Image: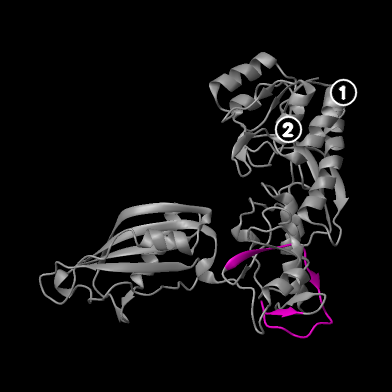
Amino acid sequence: MRLVFAGTPDPAVPSLRALLDSPRHEVVAVVTRPDAPAGRGRKLVRSPVGTLADEAGVPVLTPARPSEPEFLARLAELAPDCCPVVAYGALVPRKALDVPRHGWVNLHFSLLPAWRGAAPVQAALRHGDEITGASTFRLDEGVDTGPVFGVVTEDVRPTDTAGDLLGRLAESGARLLVATLDGIEDGTVEARPQPADGVSHAPKVTTADARVDWTAPPVAIDRLVRSVTPEPGAWPTFREERLGLGPVTRADDAPALAPGELRAEKRRVLVGTAGAPVQLGEVRPVGKRPMPAADWARGVRIAAGERLSRAQDDIVARGWAIEFRLNAEDPTRGFLPSPGKVGTVELPAGPWVRVDTWLESGATVPPFYDSLLAKVVVWGEDRDSAIRRSRRALAEFTVEGVPTTAGLHTEILDQEWFGAGEFHTGALEQWLSEREEPA
């Protein structure tokens, strides 16, 4: 069959190589994500799939979006019989899905319908799955929801990292993809709808997701660290700097330690958890290469009682920062005055919410104020939900311990999205300080 292959990262390379080597199929073009800046020089670098295609002399298409008219026209000109896709990295629109007569066949690294989404291997490790695998299915407009052609299984080993497991699945999955395409050409395979039961989701893993919570049990910490190795990499903070961690091992023979507490011995470094301590393997201080934890500990000279931390106010997350003006319904019963910032509101259920306020004068009856400027920070991706949670927080708001009993009319003045890796103390403090306290 004439094939147009779509893929981008290293795990897609074995599939492209297997199809290039197949005597039954012809790869007439490759679609991959545009060249991206990488390294200290931030030079544009071709994707691993694009690099292999260049070496094989196969034309490479790099649309910013596969919905671009130029790309759709070029795809139609190529007239593929089928488009195999492995970790391409963009949603394929209906107009593109309809071009090949056999559709687009996706290789996904889970046993569908389990772990639909961007990070199935990481999810399988984090949740302690003993068996996982890969599936081929016909791509549709949903997220990994199309009918399945075939599967291959893979045992999860006790020490597997995401890199280890994904490497094996990339190879076995490549063989499955070739067999699926052979069967489509022969008419010997049939795609069957995914069952309604057993659906689970595996969203993209962020830097925030990789931060270690030492109040968790050691088995959970072990699974987390392995699931984010090598990317994005597990980390806590030590002396207010991020410390990268490699896989850890349980140390049942070690003395009890408080969660996060460090203990440096001659040949090992231990950290307390909610259960038995764990032994650190490799660590990576900021700006340095990975090193054995014992070597790192000798260099930093860990003091008694020092900890690896996870401070709530320094967490890297995603969320909305929203600025409100709170207007009193009755200016004569306005807000009590306050010298500046006013505490934190913690909602009983839901993400952490922070409220900072600046008072504006103008009330007709001193010493009250008729309005407040409030900046609210809310974890979470949904804007409308963030606004609702913000207003709930403001409804519970107090100034110097006195409830704001006057009716509130909230008006949104500004809003800003903080993505993963940006939503941390420094960025928040800068945002919160952009409006000076009125004189």
Say which label, 2 or 1, has the lower sequence index.
2
From the top left corner, tell me how far across and down residue 335 is, in percent.
Answer: 23, 73
Q: CA distance from mark 2 to mark 1?
A: 27 Å
Rendered residue at 73%/59% (across/down): 290
Secondary structure under badge 2? helix
Q: Quadrant of the N terminus?
A: top right
Q: For residue 185, what is the image quadrant?
A: top right
Instruction: Identify the residue at the far right of this view.
Output: 23
User: Would you name the residue on which mark 1 appears?
Assistant: 186
**How many callouts does the rendering have?**
2
**In this view, 332 is above or below 223:** below
Q: Nearer the viewer, residue 46 or 99?
A: 46
From the top left corner, tell me how far across and down residue 106 is, in percent.
Answer: 74, 35
Which region of the structure is painted magenta? 241-264
From the top left corner, tell me how far across and down residue 301 is, in percent.
Answer: 68, 77
Q: Nearer the viewer, residue 306 or 117?
A: 306
Rendered residue at 62%/41% (across/down): 38
**In this view, 376 is above or below 95:** below
Q: For residue 6, what is the image quadrant?
A: top right
From the top left corner, tell me how far across and down residue 220 is, in percent.
Answer: 73, 68
Q: Is residue 91 visible?
A: no
Query: How many residues crowd mark 1 within 10 Å: few (<14), some (14–19), many (20+)?
Result: few
Rendered residue at 64%/80% (across/down): 306
User: Would you name the residue on which mark 2 appears?
Assistant: 49
Rendered residue at 44%/56% (across/down): 320
Asked if residue 318 lies left or right of residue 75, the reply is: left
- Looking at the rendered structure, which numbered label has been put on residue 12? none
